[in-house]
Image (spheres, helix red, strand yellow):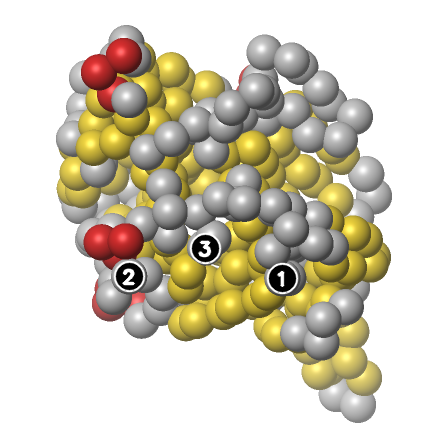
């Protein structure tokens, strides 16, 4: 596939994203999402959604449906409570990989249920900052599923860890599995001066949810910036301050979008 593609490095700046801002939610969308639709910006590779969300304490997404989508959530700050109609529930926090396979249909909610005890009273306090990413599954109509796994802090610092993957060679490395054999999510936490090398793939999506880095051959990237790579990879990323990277490696693209 890569042989028929032209190498491109497409930088998308944070300020140019679609945005949904209401009383309890500040959500920035890298791709068309909900009422924010642009037919020229529906996906890259197999990635359809890359939402950068901040949810106020005590608030969140009420029960709502999904189907035929692999949904991966990565928390940067705070915590998020997940509950779904298949009986899964859990607390998602920084360093915990989480995947929900919507399959034939699932209902779920996501709430920021952070509390702090102050004397004899407790109150909601901290906002939660997380990135939610959707990739298409290999096939529709699968049984809904859920998986979460904590990644050791040392596995993320100064190098990439495989957060979620359906690629065969990652079977023993990935914290969680996704139902797409052509896609994998890598994450890294970098301190100033750390350097990582991007994987090679027909399609890559780099998202910088926090920090400031330099991308070889391109220049500076800041929090909220993203880069869409086609038929290229192997560039070095150097942290100019403490940063967090999320990189999708994809060996196919969505057909018919």
Residue 129 to residue 116: above or below: above
Toward the viewer: 242 or 85? Answer: 85
Q: Are marks 2 and 1 in contact (CB under 8 Å)?
A: no
Q: Could you tell me how many numbered marks the image carries?
A: 3
Question: Image quarter for residue 56?
Answer: bottom right
Which residue position is annotated with label 2?
Answer: 171
Q: Residue at x 46, y 19 (%)?
A: 12
**Residue at screen point 56% across, 33% down:** 48
Judge whether residue 170 can be spotted in this image: yes
Foreground tag (3 vs 1): 1
Q: CA distance from mark 2 to mark 3?
A: 10 Å
Q: Position of residue 151 (x, y in %)?
A: 35, 68
Q: Which residue is mark 1?
A: 143
Label 2 or label 1, whichever lies nearer to me, is: 1
Mark 1 burial class by Cα count in 10 Å: few <14, some 14-19, many 20+: few
Residue 185, given in percent of the width and then of the height, sits at 38, 47
Specify the quadrant of the image occupied by residue 210: top left
Res. 177 image quadrant: bottom left
Element at label 2: loop
In terms of secondary structure, where does tag 3 sit? loop
Of pointers 2 and 3, the one earlier in the residue sequence: 2
The residue singled out by tag 3 in the image is: 178
Do labels 2 and 3 touch, CB within 8 Å? no
Q: Position of residue 149 (x, y in %)?
A: 43, 71
């Amino acid at each position: 596939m890569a042989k028929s593609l032209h190498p491109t490095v497409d930088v998308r700046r944070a300020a140019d994203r679609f945005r949904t801002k209401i009383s309890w939610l500040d959500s920035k969308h890298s791709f068309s999402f909900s009422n924010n639709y642009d037919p020229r910006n529906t996906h890259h590779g197999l990635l359809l959604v890359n939402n950068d969300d901040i949810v106020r304490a005590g608030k969140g997404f009420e029960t709502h449906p999904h189907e035929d989508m692999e949904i991966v959530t990565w928390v940067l700050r705070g915590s998020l409570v997940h509950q779904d109609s298949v009986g899964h529930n859990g607390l998602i926090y920084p360093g915990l990989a989480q995947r929900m396979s919507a399959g034939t249909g699932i209902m779920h909610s996501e709430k920021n249920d952070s509390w702090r005890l102050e004397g004899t009273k407790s109150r909601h306090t901290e906002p939660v900052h997380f990135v939610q990413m959707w990739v298409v599954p290999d096939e529709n109509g699968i049984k809904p599923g859920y998986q979460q796994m904590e990644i050791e802090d040392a596995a993320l610092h100064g190098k990439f860890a495989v957060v979620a993957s359906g690629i065969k060679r990652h079977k023993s490395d990935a914290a969680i599995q996704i139902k797409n054999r052509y896609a994998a999510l890598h994450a890294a936490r970098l301190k100033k001066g750390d350097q990582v090398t991007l994987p090679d793939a027909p399609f890559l999506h780099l998202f910088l949810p926090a920090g400031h880095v330099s991308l070889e051959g391109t220049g500076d990237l800041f929090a909220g910036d993203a880069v869409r790579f086609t038929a290229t990879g192997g560039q070095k990323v150097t942290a100019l301050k403490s940063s967090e990277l999320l990189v999708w490696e994809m060996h196919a693209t969505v057909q018919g979008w």
